[in-house]
Each structure stands twice: as structure tokens, then as C-alpha cells.
Image: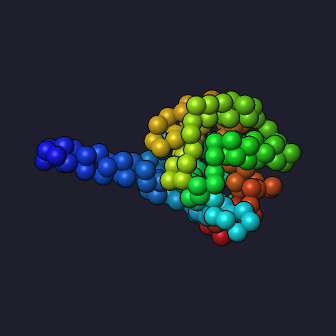
Amino acid sequence: MKKSTIVKGSMAALLAVLLALPLFSAKLGGKEMVQNGSGSRTKFGMHLYNAALSVPQEMKGGDENTIINADEPMSIYISITSGMISKEKFVDAVSEGFDSAAKSGFAADKSAYLNLYNGVTIQKGDSFNNYYIPGQGLTVTHNNKALGTIKGVQIKKAFFAIFIGPKPAQASLKKGMLGK
């Protein structure tokens, strides 16, 4: 194998690792972002994914309602840690999460979000970043490839309520993401 091929492959691998890192401190929508908290989603004792919530510095430590209702840039980064997660299971779980969020007063057109996953394959090691920028909407990336952007703050509120709302996917995950 040529030395230049090895160097190019190594550089590409390093770039991929660096791009896959969640937002711990970066700018989003012109604001300095910090990680508010993180946690793990488990079911029947199985570890399914890790999720991290990043918010503007001035919102760090805010309560669930303040964060959900804020028309501020923020993100939820998800890293799949189980081979048991398929696209179908993931989409079904997110759909149920949107239904729970709607029952808590955070309704949005979930089909716009779920349709972003058409043609996506999900496997252990994959990452998703769901970041909101006021005036632009909620952008979803899969392994750093943009799946699309949904305009409006309502979809952001509903999506964030899945994780930190009154009826979250998992109470311990919510607690971790809120930094409690």
C-alpha cells in the first residue's frame, strides 16, 4: 500500500472522529454553547443510547420548561450504543415520544421529523445531532450528514419534550440531561 494512501486514510479517519464529537463547547446560532448534562437510555437493563443536551451558557442548569420553551439555539446529541436499535425501533420510539409530548402540551407535526429517516440505516456507533437555531428550525444530522431541517420552534419544543418534558422517555435520562 502506498504511503500517501495510508496518510490520506489516517487523516480521513481522524477527521471523522473529530466531527463525530458532540457539542461540548462551541457556537450555535451565534451563542456560546455548553453541555448542560447527559445520560443513558436503558430498557430492561440494556444500554441503548447516550444523549447530551447543549444549551447557551446563560441557560445552563435551567429547568425543563425554561429549556423546552426557549427560542434559543440548543442541541440534543444521541450516540447509539446498542446493536439492538434498528431504524424501525428508533422511529417507533421517537413517534411514541412525540405522542407523549403532545399529551403534555407540546404538539407538533411528527411526520415531518419521522420522514427525515426515510432511507436511513441505524446501527451501533451511529450518532444523531438534533440542533435548533431560531429562525432556521431543527436540523437533524446522522453521522454528520444533514438529513434535513424542519422550520419552526414547535417541532423543537416537542422533540426536546421527548427527553426532558413532563412525560420523558426515561426519568433518569431526563435528570442527567438537566444536569441534576
88 and 117: which one is in front? 88
Name the side, left or right, on which 95 lies relative to 133: right
Q: Report the front residue among 51 and 161.
A: 51
Q: Identify which residue is drawn at 43% across, 50% down.
A: 20
* Of the pair 7 and 71, the residue shown nearer to us: 7
**Quick check: 28 above or below 43?**
above
Give residue 174's quadrant in the image: bottom right
Name the residue located 20 percent from the left edge and 48 percent from the top edge: 6
Q: Position of residue 31 (x, y in %)?
A: 48, 47
Q: Residue at the spot x=52%, y=41% of the render?
A: 142
Q: How many marks?
A: 0
Most extreme residue toward the front, as rendered?
Answer: 1
Judge whether 98 appears above or below 167 on screen.
above
Asked whether residue 114 appears in the rendered view, the answer is yes
- Residue 13 percent location from the top left of the image: 31, 49
The answer to whether 53 is drawn above or below residue 132 in the figure is below
Residue reaching furthest to the left: 3
Q: How are the residues colored?
A: rainbow
Residue at 63 percent across and 64 percent down: it is 47
- Residue 116 percent coordinates (x, y): 61, 32
Q: In the rendered image, which quarter is residue 103 located in?
A: top right
Q: Which quarter of the rendering shows the C terminus?
A: bottom right
- The answer to whether residue 61 shows anywhere in this view is no
Displayed quadrant of residue 177: bottom right
The image position of residue 118, as x and y in percent, is: 62, 31
Is residue 103 positioned above or below 124 on the image? above
